[in-house]
Amino acid sequence: MFRFVLFTLLAVCAVSASAAADPISNDPTAVVTKALHKLAPNAKIESVTAAPLAGFYAVVVDGRPVFVSTDGKYLIEGHVLDIEARRNVMDDAMAGVRKQALANIPQSKRITFAPPHPKYHVTVFTDVDCPYCREFHKQIAEYNKLGIAVDYVLFPLVIHPGADKKAQTVWCSKDRNVAYNEAMDGKALAPLACPNPIAEITNTANAIGINGTPAIFSDDGAQLGGYVPPAQLAKQLQDMAQPQAKSAP
Amino acid sequence: MLKKILVLAALVAATPFAHAADPAEKVVRDALHSLLPLAVVDKVAKSDLPGFYEVVVSGQIAYVSADGKYLLQGSLYDVAHKQNLTDASLAKMRAQAIAKLPATKEIRFDVANPKHTVTVFTDVDCPYCRAFHKNIGQFNALGISVHYVMYPLDIHPNADKQAVAVWCSPDRNAAYTAAMNGKDPGTATCANPVSETKALGIALGINATPTVLTEDGTSVDLGKATSPQALLAELDRLSAERAKTKVAAR
């Protein structure tokens, strides 16, 4: 997408280069790319948007948020706190990128455990060999009962040798939900192989800075956990659905 | 520097066009106070980043927008010079402070004509401080002078009393070495700088021991200094880098 914008701009610049001294420098992606590549030549820029802070772009690079001054001279890494709202606005850029990344994972690449009439929907990056992922799944009926539809995406961590094979086996089973239940119960399944979305999910996870499991996200890209028990997760989702009630004094 | 500012302020104040004070500075202080009512603000000064003030609160550097709306905490980079300006500010603040520490407030293991002098914030009860001091003879042999600053951590009960006991021994260097080898330093007391150096450490954002600072205030990554030779190499590297930055800045 950004590459596309950049190419278009270059094409435009080629015909109108004489009109302005340095037309490229007004393009946010070009300014940010030039600045970031000076600091980190291999950095992969995932998004550039206007920051809430005047004079800065909010940038997601290699799965992390940074701010870059619109003149490309300064870069800020860390937290940017809106003092009055007591909120880290640096995270907002991440949420946008996460939302898009989650939306890009089709239903056919998820393993869904949903109640008949779900009130809420979460995407959970999970690893068959991760203890808290197992703890989470033990209570899947409880999450569903509270109206939470859970979409798992398989994200075996490299720190768990063999977890990728197990994830592949689950995916390649005739009934993925049953196989996932069994794997989370610690049952050893006969290894299966087939085309699967694990590499793609892993790329997505890296691009949005997920480095542990379980990682729970709402559809708007907010990270809800870590492992969160059913009642608490329902409460968080409920609070998010009624932001006006939360912001009341 | 301060004197210069005061003189300048006096001159400015004498002119009819003068502003009493930078109004944004008050906005910044008020914003910090609303966020951290109990925090002691050590410094508010215009930052390299246009529209922002650099502030020092409890030894931590942050940046507050001149309108008082945003606080940046983390690292600010100067892209063109590939420099972490936050680290540079912290190092400068630390360098100025340790340059002012007299021999009478440190326990020094000096060599004649040192290649490097490091200032080490240390705690008698900290295992890594003990491991560090085991090599003191080799550090000195390699031309590294070591100046210890007593910085007993709250997580070590009685470490403050032990630091005082070491300080109040007739031979501080011998008592420090003995304590670092596990000998009980006893309970001697006397007038001592321990609470002062501890407050200094907090104000400089020192949050672990040992913290090893070069003369320009850079904190040495001890992961890169696993042996006396490696420490020397790291100190050489840091001072070469410093020389390069100076040339680049010219």
Image: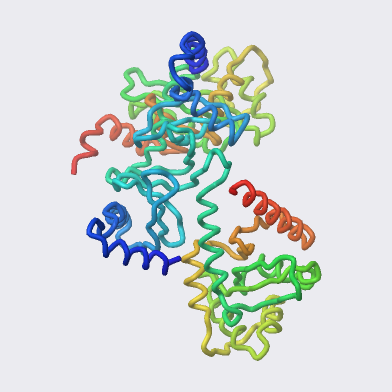
Residue A156 in sight: yes
Residue B100: % across, % down: 54, 73
Q: Residue at x 23, y 39 (%)?
A: A247
Residue A122: % across, % down: 41, 26
B83 over B189 or under it: above or below: above
Q: Between residues B61 and B121, which one lies in front from this camera angle?
A: B61
Answer with left or right where residue B155 lies relative to residue A116. right
Residue B137: % across, % down: 78, 73
Residue B145 lies in quadrant: bottom right
Q: Residue at x 53, y 79 (%)?
A: B194
Q: Between residues A162 and A218, which one lies in front from this camera angle?
A: A218
Q: Residue at x 66, y 65 (%)?
A: B128
Q: Between residues B102 and A122, which one lies in front from this camera angle?
A: B102
Residue B130: % across, % down: 69, 70
A133 over B59 or under it: above or below: above
In the displayed image of the protein, which residue is found farthest to the front? B15
Answer with left or right where residue A117 lies relative to residue B131. left
Q: Between residues A12 and B61, which one lies in front from this camera angle?
A: A12
